[in-house]
Image (cartoon, rainbow, N blue to C red):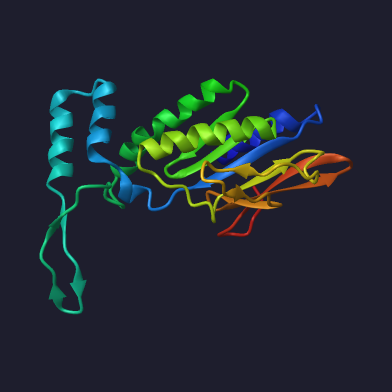
Amino acid sequence: MLYTVRHVVERFTKGSGNTVNLCAIDLSKAFDKVNHHALLIKLMKRNLPVVLIDILENWLKNCSSMVKWDCVLSYTFAVKFGVRQGSVLSPFLFAIYLDDISVNRSLIPSSFVVMYADDILLIAPSVSELQRLYHACEFELSCLDMCINTKKSCCIRIGLRCDVKCASISTMKGHNLPWVSEMRYLGTYINVFIYNQRPTVQMCCYECQTFI
C-alpha cells in the first residue's frame, strides 16, 4: 500500500512540478458499526454461493457477548452490529462492506482512493477535486452508518506549492480538516521537503524509525 501511495504521488509531482493533495480519513469504531443486513446484501450482489451466505448469516446472527467485572459476569446480550476484531475473516468482510467507496474514484478520473481496512487515503491533483472526492466518500460512509473522526483526519499537500495557503477541506457538517506538514498513514509518517527546488516525499516507519 505504501508503495502504491508513493508511486501515485510521484506520478503527479516528478518532472511536472505539479502539487498533489492527500486526505487521510479516520473512521470512528469502524469494525463495530458494520450493518449485518447491508453486508449480506453486498455479498449477494457479488454472487457468492447461497450456502456460504447462509453460513455467514448464521455466524453473524448468533453472535452474543457479556461483560466481566472482576469475577462477576453480566447476562449475555445479542451483538447486532459489527464484525469480530481479530478474526481472520473480518478484514475481508469489512473490505467488501466499504468497497463501493472506490467507485467514487470513477466520478473524478484523475483522483485515487487507497484503502486498507479502515484506513482511507484520498489523492487528488487539486484542492477542489479533493473536496468533491471527500464529499462523495463522506456521503457513501454516512449511508453505511460510518462516522468520520474529523479530529484525527487531516490533509497534506506535496509538491512545489506545498507551502501555499489554500482553502480548507470542509465536511458536510461544516467542520474543516486541517492542512498539516506531516501525516501518519498505516503506521508511517508521510512528509515532504524541498530539495534542489524539487519536492521529495519522505516516509518514515513509526515503529522502527527507519525511512521507506
Q: Position of residue 133 (x, y in %)?
A: 56, 32
Q: Residue at x 55, y 59 (%)?
A: 207
Q: 27 left or right of 112?
A: left
Asked whether, in this view, residue 201 is left or right of residue 8, the answer is right
Q: Position of residue 20 (x, y in %)?
A: 70, 35
Viewer-proximal residue among 84 and 41: 41
Name the residue nearer the viewer: 187 or 103.
Answer: 103
x and y, in percent, of residue 171 in the image = 55, 43
Determine the residue positioned at 54% across, 21% down: 107
Looking at the image, residue 53 lies above or below residue 191: above
Residue nearest the observer in this picture, 22 or 168 = 168
| Residue 140 sits in quarter | top left
Quadrant of res 108: top right
Q: Is 168 drawn above or below residue 127 in the view shown?
A: below
User: Is 187 on the left or on the right of 11, as rendered?
Assistant: left
Q: Position of residue 78 (x, y in %)?
A: 14, 53
> Which residue is drawn at the image coordinates 34% and 48% (left, top)?
31
Judged left or right of residue 93, residue 112 is right
Q: Residue at x 55, y 40 (%)?
A: 121
